[in-house]
Image (cartoon, rainbow, N blue to C red):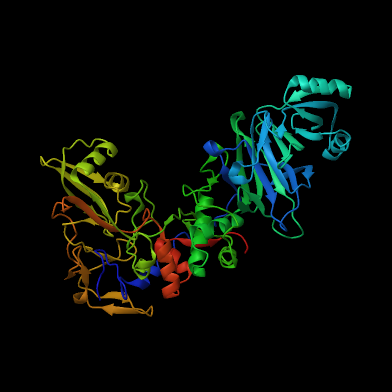
Amino acid sequence: MRLTGKWARVSATVIMVCMLALLTTPIAGSNYEPFRPRFTTLRIGLQFGSTALPSANLRNVDGYGRGFDFGFFDGERDFVPIGAFTSETAITMAMDRNMVWNPSAAEGRGEFREGTSGNIVLGAFHVQHGRSFATFEEARALANQHTGGFVRYHSGLSEPFLVMIGQHTTRAAAETAMANLNIPGASVCSGTANTITVVRTGTNVILFEWEAGNTPLGVRPRPIGNENPETWFRGFRYNGAFSYQRRDGGLLTVINMVDIEDYVKGILPYEMSNTWPLEALKAQALTARTFAIRSLGRHASQGFDLCVEVHCQVYRGRGLANDRTDRAVDETRGMFVTFEGRPAETVYASSNGGASENVENVWVEARPYLRGVLDPFEAYVVRRIAGYNWTVRHTPAALTERLRTRITGFNLSTVAAVRVTRRSETGNAIGVTITDVNGRTHTLNGRSQILAGLGTPTLRFDVAGGAVWAPAQLVANDPAQVVPGDTQLFAIDGSGNTVAVPSANMRAITGDGNVTAVSPGGASGIGGGTGLVDGQFTIHGTGNGHQVGMSQWGAFAMAHYHNMDFRDIIHFYFTGVEITETYQR
């Protein structure tokens, strides 16, 4: 047997330390009240801030919806219909301003932009009928009697449904139209900073207007039979309903109001391949669901819970979902990873390079369930992971300039040596000392400084010319489970069986390709050399990601090569957690 790389990355047989202990960690939290999420409807920001829109199109997916209901969402995130609806299957929400339709905008799907010159112009000035109504149907009946008539909902009135007629780009034109109509009590009006106009997509035919102050407009697709509606928005298919608000009177913030299970179905095939083993997908579903419920209100200042990018979780709806990914969500429905009765922070990344890390060495706050573990499973899939083995090189001048511009307080002269001077229990570099040509030193501590200063993808690295690193202690899933060097070591063979491994047979491959014996009580990998190879500081490492929590490729290997289920995966990467079922599947 040999240890490939410098941190126990193996090919055919994987060094393991008491694997059974790793997967049978005593469960915490049994004396705590069962966790129950307050909300199962999530608010997902699709377009907001710098990506907010002047107009936003919706279209029913054929066979999965027929028209839309209008209303709002209450404090419990339930949709409250106001009786207003449309049978149109393609609608556009826009600011109530003078707008021009641009058919080639929004990636070829078209959008309204402010202006008055174009083939299709949406005017901001309307004639308001003198009557108001308590119901949408009453107002619509009168609106249909007038060319260009439509209904506006105004929440501040006792009879909130108003009849509007026509749309004009100037107040003068609207006043002329009002004089021709000769309707008692009529007036000319335009929208406020909060008004949202709903039109038939690609036209200036107004279907409905919403004026409710800071209360966002809710738009819910109307189902066909028992089908779960799906709606096209900017090239993606989404379940759930939608919310629109002109925050501070500006462009439209668009939010998907979606059940948490549908949300996870829209994450899973974008965070993990839809062809991967079912148990790996189930582990991903469980971590994604738990992360979401723990992160409710992460974007509260912008009016929603989570965004759709890697800052939160990649969410793109139904596009890549298939029977396998849907099954993974359905078979873990209502399950959350909990610690001491509360949802855990179930972070994950592509790969950890051979060992995860204690969270406080990566970010700031320690968590008892986010402890680093030696991870032998990625070794089975190294060749499948793009960029898993990496090398970073810097000339002395380039590294000196990088450190001066990226590290606060760095004032050394030209760098002469780079050394790893502190490692975590799992062997990741958490302290790197820089020495200049005058012998002065500066130490980079923690992930943010090290990655910023050296430009490495992970903390799983060594500097060329330094000592070959081997763990000073072999540990199971926490530092309390140290395996002394003179006790029996274990490995998982190609069939997934646990077998004893004599420590005298342990080998590692050094940075120059030589095979050398490694003792469990051996070198720490601290000190030695300058890091210079052919005039450049050369750093070799493995992995992609922050190294905290679950390795997605590790989960793949556990499921595919060892027939481990999602519970095994969760308990391996998250120390001492429970899997709690909070509502019926």
Query: Which residue is located at x 21 percent, y 68 percent?
Result: 509
How many dots with numbers? 0
Image location (x, y in percent) of residue 340: 46, 56
User: Which quarter of the rendered picture does the N terminus lie within?
Assistant: bottom left
Give the residue displayed 60% in from the left and 67% down from the top.
Answer: 323
Where residue 31 appears, as percent x and y from the top left, is 49, 59
Q: x and y percent of residue 570 in the render?
A: 45, 64
Asked whether residue 3 appears in the rendered view, the answer is yes
Q: Nearer the viewer, residue 306 or 110?
A: 110
Toward the viewer: 111 or 412?
Answer: 111
From the viewer's side, name the closer residue of 275 and 342. Answer: 275
Residue found 49% across the figure and 67% down from its top: 276
Q: Position of residue 186 (x, y in %)?
A: 84, 23
Q: Residue 26, can we see it?
A: no
Q: Is residue 327 above or below residue 257?
A: below
Q: Residue most toward the left?
A: 438
Residue that appears at 53% across and 46% down? 306
Quarter of the image containing the C terminus?
bottom right
